[in-house]
Each structure stands twice: as structure tokens, then as C-alpha cells.
Image: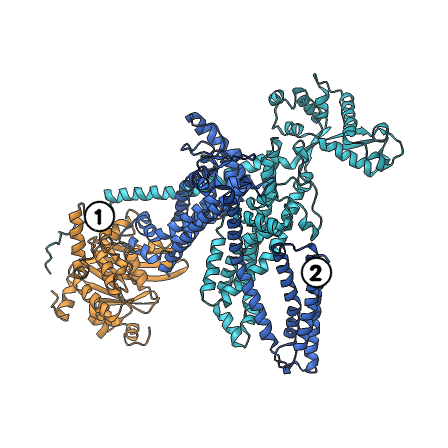
Chain colours: A blue, B cyan, C orange
Amino acid sequence: MSPLTTLIIILGLAGLGYLLGRRRAVALVAGDTRQLHSRPAYHGWLVALLAALPPLGLLVLGGLAGPLIPGATHGAGALLAPAAALLALAGLGVGLARISPGFRARNAVERVIGLLLILCSLIAIATTLGIVLSLVFESASFFRLYPWHEFLFGTEWTPRFGGGSKLGMLPLLWGTLYISFIALLVAVPIGLFAAIYMSEYASRRVRAVAKPAIEVLAGIPTIVYGLFALVTVGPLIRDWLAQPLGLGDSGASVATAGLVMGIMLIPFVSSLSDDIINAVPQSLRDGALGLGSTPSETIRHVVIPAALPGIVGAVLLAASRAIGETMIVVLGAGAMARISGNPFEAMTTITVKIVGQLTGDNDFNSPETLVAFALGLTLFVMTLGLNVLALYIVRKYREQYE
Amino acid sequence: MSDPAQTAPRPRRSLLQTDAGTRRRNAAERRFRTYGAAAILTAMAALAVLMFTVFRDGASAFVQARATIPVVIAADVVDPQGNRDPAEMAKILTMSYSRLLDQALTREIARSGIQVGGLTQRDITGFLSAQARADLRRAVLADPSLVGQEIEWRMMTSSRVDAMLKGRITREMAARDARTSVAQYDLAMALRDRGVVRAGFNWRFITAPDGSDSRPEAAGLGVAILGSFYMMLIVLVLALPIGVAASIWLEEFAPKNRLTDVIEVNISNLAAVPSIVFGILGLAAFINFVGLPRSAPIVGGLVLTLMTLPTIIISTRAALKAVPPSIRDAALGVGASRMQTVFHHVLPLAMPGVLTGTILGLAQALGETAPLMLIGMVAFVTTYPSAPPQGLFDPASALPVQIYNWTQRADPAFFERASGAIIVLLAFLLAMNLIAIWLRRKFERRW
Amino acid sequence: MNQMTQAERSVQTETRDVKFECRDVQVWYGEKHALKDVGVDILDKTVTAFIGPSGCGKSTFLRCLNRMNDTIAAARVGGQMLLDGEDIYDPRVDPVQLRARVGMVFQKPNPFPKSIYDNVAYGPRIHGLAPTRADLDAVVEKSLRRAALWDDVKDRLGETGTSLSGGQQQRLCIARAIATSPEVLLMDEPCSALDPIATAQIEELIDELRDRYSVVIVTHSMQQAARVSQKTAFFHLGHLVEYASTDDIFTSPKDPRTESYITGRIG
């Protein structure tokens, strides 16, 4: 039985269960449904849920647990489908047997639905757990093959699939931080000023044009920014800045990736700052204006200081975005792992190397492939730290003005 | 009241004259405003330049130069046995058809009296797309009655001839390029002037599968669009119900306890986890652990579902929160259970907001590239996946990954394709956003 | 001067200079005509109270006096308002300069999220009124003393303004307003967010401020108007119904609407 036929059989039995359950409930009270505690449909639903949920759960668990059981052959998998069908039939029978006029079918259905809702909420935790487990387990097998201190503190990145690789993370970390720093240097002032202008100065007409335009910037996929870096910005920076200054002749560079990533982050910073600036109570603005501040003095002396924690949170979130951004750096930053201060040189980042080591044919027993998981773990820990900190700051900030 | 620190009253100045201090402060005010306006203008200029370059580079991908020439399907070449048996004829490889096309083109040049000095056999063979022979062979095998006839055959020119007609390759560049020649350039211009070669709308770009490195003119987005569509289908089917269910529980039922807090923090953090980490999850969990196939839309769809869930949950909760408590009180007041209240009253009222959030989440997922690269969707796929559900397990590409893929090819013609594919991607995103805006406008309710 | 009797006070007000001279003042909020044909003379060194039911336009009028309505995009103001004979709505007038001379205290205490010292020093700093640190210290101390807050906070000037109690915060806001040495002090229901004890302290302070400033106070409490003011204006539905000495308003109102209001029949 293919999974699809099993699924159809289970759902068919559930549908049948609904019809039978309903009919039986009505029949028990000879058509006078007011004698039932719950409306007939609920009796039907309960039978359907009893017929569908246990076998579906069995299928999912079986599918997940299959790889865990050593020596589980395909035969065991083949047994799963008939077992599920039988379970469905059993559920149908049990459900029908329980129907009686006084039976609280609605409460039972609602309890089951409630459990389903909780289950769905738990998927968020399961996802995080899945991420952590897959990163930790694969990283562990990497660190069995490669010493952790050389990974963390090594300054050389030269993977060789023949063996003798040097897999030091520092050049990648340096590139990541350098590019993120330039991106923030672009995005924070522009985003912040854009938010300030939009919330404190812009006329309705200007807002009607500028706000959607900035939102469009936020909706553009990163691959588009990546191509923009590769085709337009990279050559532009190379021909007009790097070469005239004699600082390099590479189109892919830290400056290219940083600039384009900065543009990508502008809407992110501006919409977060916009929310935060709007959360500053009007009474504070009135207080400053009433003393004879100009609008800009009000913003600089009162609004920004009051909003500062929130803005710091927004910048941290933007930094986390920048560190985890992939496509712009893949296309705009280059693949050279090096530590240099020259922003016009090609450097590389953690995300670039994750992509590099994990695309193409992988040998999941070689440190050159597995290092990607250790890099992923590093990236996850860094961004998680930034996010938790930022969300904490922003939440505290909001509570202050609620 | 006698106050020692009391200062003499300030000399009264007229309000009608601004003093120096105020003038200085007003100048600072104007500067500050200018910075703000400059920031907005910078952002808008960046958007304009981005859009401009994409359309400048990509619009020509939707146009393709094609040649229409009479081709003699010589029986001795394609059917040496002479029995018109497709099985026998299938043994004849595409190279032979290339000879037919070369002959046809040479005849056409002679017939229209074009005089081009230094035209070599390589220029002739390289004039037409390598895809043209394959197409002709397929047509003949499908209809053996064509053998021995002369047919008007319309076919793609090679990407370089295409680029000459579009002006991307000039005569000077043709002279320098080893893969083309001035003679080929002159031939292209002459054939265009005589109407033999003509540019037309390029449907193949949208429908055809990817093309190999040597034939960018044949590369299309068909497989990628289908793959992306399958993945969006999976995301919609999984993320919408799961997201709504999770939101309902968190917003309407969840007790204030440790578990709820953990889930809440978890969701806001998941929304900010870099997308590439989800790719690693997909690779480690779905492919290596569960054993799902690489490059398959099912894996991509699952990964994108997990990525989109936080977005959908956050917007759904906002929509649920916007339904006023009075509605809940009213339903509970007439004896509905809490579950009935939510499913009969609150959720329907929140639905427009939920759908808007879902569409925006889908749009975000549609543009996502990095996680899909890790689960093998960068592979070169030239066959369409079959219909779902089986097709969900077939190898496919995805729109943004196809774009990346093309940026990594050597032939500059692929850059045109990549930009053209971006236009297609942006068109899809625009359509989705317009639907979201329309939904919001149509069903927007204010309490 | 504080020991003057009520009678002495009312006589004295008649001899005061006119600080604000307002004629035919109109205010529109978008389509809504919020204030109609208001004419009033506000005297120097006098506490003037604006009373009336909520939505009557008293706060709107107050906010016209230092052009705070400029910050609301939809608001339009017409008519004439002269401060010492100069039209404050003249295009040459910079509202920044005007607001340095016409200070304002708001309904809810709104200290800036800065130290107590910086709150008070803010006005003098932006207007460049205290060139040296010593001057600034003197201004801060003088203003805090005048707002009867100095003794409470002199040892903790570096703490943030929001750490004070509600009444102290409002006195801090008053200190902040008088630190720029304004001529007129506008107060928009300054006690409505305070408890009775803090209210009494602020009212006492207002009475002392009369020495030096023209104080205009908007209040929804008639008792408060009677306690602190010498002149009272009664607003109703956007009109200035009656403007007279406080004693006259509360003892022998001329307009039946005023009488209805002070006897509690409308409100």
C-alpha cells in the first residue's frame, strides 16, 4: 500500500464514521434531537476523529521512528499501513459504541481539538529542537574528526578534499563581522533618518509615496539583491573607487556586499524604528515643543533618548539579519577566506562557506563537509544570542510606555 | 518673596524679529530635515536603480531571435533504411540533423544572394541553436511523413546571434570574441534585413526546462516555476492550518504559564533565525535522517513551511487580537462554548487578516534561496516533475535557485536569463502582494 | 502681597497691563469649527482661569496662545492674538521664540527621561540663556526653589525625573517651564492627574507664581478656578460666554449659561 492509498483509506473511514455516528445519534432518540446532550454532528465528528487521529499519529511516528530503529527493514514499514488501517477501523467501532443520548460528545470533540491546537503550537518548539539537535549532532561528528580549538581559533581556511585541510573559522568570522558592520553603517543612519522623517515631518502625500516604496524594498528577495551586487554595484565600486584608489581590482568585495546588504536592511531598520518612535508618548514631544524646542531638537533631545533602548534592540536585530544573510554575500563578497582591513578586497563569510561545503556532492564522513554544521552552529548561537538580547530589550522598552 | 538668585528680567525683544540664536537653531532644523529627506530619497533611489538594472538587463530575455528557413528532411540522412520506422530512425543522432540545418542555411544564404566574406562552416553551424537540431529530430520522429519533404522550419538562433540582434554584441566585440566572428555578425544582420531572422516573444523562456551550459538560448523557467508552485502548495496546505491552530491556542486558550512563555519566545526567535539554518535542518533532518529525496519539492516545501510558520502565527495572532472582546462576550453570552465562540465568530472575523498574513508569508517563502540550495535544489534538472502527489518527490528546481544557478554559468547570455527570471519572480511577488492588499481593502473592518 | 484680601485683589487686577489681547479668534480642526469669535484680554501678573464643560474649546484656546496648535496638521487658526501688541500669528514670528516667552505645563506630568537637573536645564540650554555652568546651576536652583521642589530634590539632582512622585513630577514640569523665564505660563489642567494633597501644593504654587508671571490655567474644577484665579472665562460649545473677575463669575454671573454651569445644571 502506498502512503497515499493508506491516507485515502483512513480519511474514507473517518468520513464514514462521521455519517454513521450522526445517524446513530439521531436514531437513538428517534429523531428528537433535543434529547441529545450534544448535537448529532458532534457525535459524528467524535467518531471521525477517533477513526482518523490514532492511525495518522501511528503513521507519522512510524515514519519518524523508522530510521531510529536499527535493523528495521522495509518489511516493518510495509506493516505500518495495514496496522494503521486496522487502527482506523477500531477507532470507528469504539466511537460508534460510545454514542448515547447523554454522552457529552461536544465536550469530547472540543478536548480533542484543544489537544490538536496545543500540538500545532508545539511544532515551534519541535522546530527549534530539530535545529539544535541536527546542528549539535553533526557538529559533534565534525569535532571528532577535527580539533575544536583549531576550528575556533585557526586563522587559516584551506579545505582540501584530499586531507590535511585547515579549517580555521576566524577568517570567516572576520568577513562576516566586517560586512555586517558596513551594512549597519549604511542601514542604521539611513533607516533611522527615514523613520524619523516619515513619522515626524513627512506630509501625507510624501508618506503615501515613500512608505510603500520602502516596503517594496523589504519585499525584494535577497537573490535579487545578490545579483544587483554582482552585476551592478560590484563593478561600480571596483571601477570608481577601488581601482582609482589603487586598493584592489575585485568586483566582489566587503564594500560591495556591505553596501547592498545595507540597502536591504534599510526597510528593516526603518520599520522597526518607526514602531519604536511612535511608541514614545506624545506628551513628551509636547513638553519639549512647549518649552520652545524646534522639532529637530525635540527629536534629538527627547524622542531619540527616550526611544534609545528600542532603537538599540532594532539595531541588534538588524545585525543578526546581516550576520545570517546568505545570498548577497554568496554573490557579492567573494570566496576568499582572509583577514584584511581593506574593504575593497574579496572576503568570505560563514554563510558562504556553509553553502560552499554543503552544495554539490557531499561526503558526510569528511570534516570538509561536516565543518558546515559547526559553522551553522556558530551562526545559530551568534544570531540566537543577538535575537534574545534584542527581543528582551525591545520588550522591556515597550512595557515602559504601556 | 526675595530671592537672591533672582536675575534681572530679560530685555524684552520683539517677536517679529528672529534673534541670532533662533536663526542658528532654525538652520540646524533645516539641516536635520534635509538629512531625513535625503535618507528617504536614498532609499527610493536605491530601489529605482535596482529596478532599472533588473529591467534593463532582463527585459530582453523575453525576446528571442528565430530564423525561418525551408529545410529539406533528406531521407538518406534521417532514414537510411528507408522504412520510415521511428524505432530505426531514433538511432540517427542529432548530429545528423545538424547537417540538414547547415545545408538549409547555406542554401538560404545563396538563395537570398547574401555576400559575406570569410564565412566559415563554424559560423554556419554556430548560427543556429543547438536546440534546433534536437527539436527538428523530435518533430521528425513524431511525424515520419515529413521525411523527404521540404518544410518551412522556424528555429532559435544561437545565443550569440540573438545577442547581436539585441545589440549586446557589436561588430567590434564579434571581432574580438573567439566563439564568433565578424562574418557571422554580418550574416546575422543581412538575414535580419531580409526578414529571415526575426525577434519574437519568447514563450520558451517561461515554459521550457533549463538548458545546458552551451545553449543558454534554450534555457527556460518551466521546471523552476513548477517546482516553486509545488512548494507553495505544500506551504499553503501545511502552514496555514498549523499556523492558525497554533495562533488560536496561544491567543485564545493558552494559560499563562512557563510552557506558553517558552513557546512565545520560541516563535519570535524562530522568526529571526537565519534562513540558511533552516536549510541545514532540512538537510540533516529530512534528507539524511528521514531519507526523503534530494532536490525534491516535498523537502523544500517542508523547510519553507517551518520558516513561514512564525510569520503566519505572528500575523494570525494580530488578526485574532484585533477582534474585539465584545464579540466573544456576545457569543459566550448566548451559551456557546469557548471553542464554538472561536470557530464560529472570532476566526471568521479574523480570516481576512489571516489570509493577508499567509499570502505575505508565502511571498517571503517564494523568494527564499539559501535553504533550498542546501537541500540540493541547485541541481541541473531538465525534466518536469510529474503531477502531485508523486511529483512532489521528483527532482525540481525553484525560481530563486534557478536565478542563482544561472549567475554561476560562464556564458553572459545566462545573465540576461537570470535578470529575466527576476522579472518573472518579481511579477509573481507583485501579484501576491496585490491580492493581499485587495483582501485587506475589501474585508477591512474597523471596530 | 500674598496676604491681600479678595477685595484688594480684584481691585488690583483692573490696573494690571494687558498681556494678551485676543480678538475674533477662530479655530478649525479640519471641518470642525472648534472655537468661534473669542475675544479676551489676559492681564499680566494675574491668574486667569478658563472653565467650561469638556469639549468647550478652553484647551484649544490655551494651545493657541503659544501656537501649540501648529503641531496639529489639521488645525487652522484665524483672528488676532497680540502679545504685548505683537501678533503672534504674524508670518515673521518664530513659534520657537514665542514659546520661550509663553511657557506651558500639561495635564499629565511629562518629565523627560533625563535627570532632574537636565529636565530643568533643558529650556535654558536650548535657548542659550545660561552661558556658563554656574549660570545654569543658578537657574536650575532658582527655578526649583520657585516651584517649591528644591528642598525635596537638591540631594538627588542626578536622578531621573520619572523617579519622582506625581505631584513632584508636575512641580518639576513647572520648574522646567519657568526656567526659561517666560512672561506667560499656560497650564492645561495641571492638577487633573494628581491627588488632593499634591493639588493643594500646586495651587499654592500657582498663587505664588502670580508675582512674576501672567498665569493662564485651564481647569474642569470650578472650585479650583475660584481658589486660584482672579479672572475667569467661561467657554461653552466653542464660544466664550462670559469673561469677568472670578468673584463676579461665581457670585453674579450675567449669562444664564454661566449660571447653569456653576450651579451644576450643565456640564
Disc 2 is placed on an element classified as helix
Residue B200's image quarter? top right
Label 1 neighbour load within 10 Å: few <14, some 14-19, many 20+? some
Taking the spot 20% from the left edge, 71% from the top edge, the residue there is: C247
Disc 1 is placed on an element classified as loop
| Any part of residue C225 in sight | no
Cα distance in 3D space between marks 1 and 2: 96 Å
Task: Specify whether A270 is left or right of B104.
Answer: left
Position of B137 relative to C14 (above/below): above
Q: Residue A136: percent from the left, percent from the top?
A: 50, 50
Position of B175 relative to B44 (above/below): above
Task: Using the image as rendered, state which of residue B328 and residue B79 is in the foreground.
Answer: B79
Position of A50 relative to B417 (above/below): below
Q: Amino acid at mark 1?
A: Ser
Question: Residue A78 has which mark?
Answer: none
Do discs 1 and 2 share a chain?
no
Q: Residue B193: percent from the left, percent from the top?
A: 70, 25
Q: Amino acid at mark 2?
A: Leu
Residue A18's image quarter? bottom right
Task: Specify whether B263 is left or right of C207.
Answer: right
Q: Nearer the viewer, mark 1 or mark 2?
A: 2
Report the chain holding disc 1. B
User: Which residue is tagged 1?
Assistant: B14
User: Which residue is tagged 2?
Assistant: A79
Q: Residue B10: percent from the left, percent from the top?
A: 16, 50
Task: Specify whether B353 is left or right of C19.
Answer: right
Task: Using the image as rendered, state which of residue B229 and residue B447 is in the foreground.
Answer: B229
Task: Specify whether C82 is left or right of B310.
Answer: left
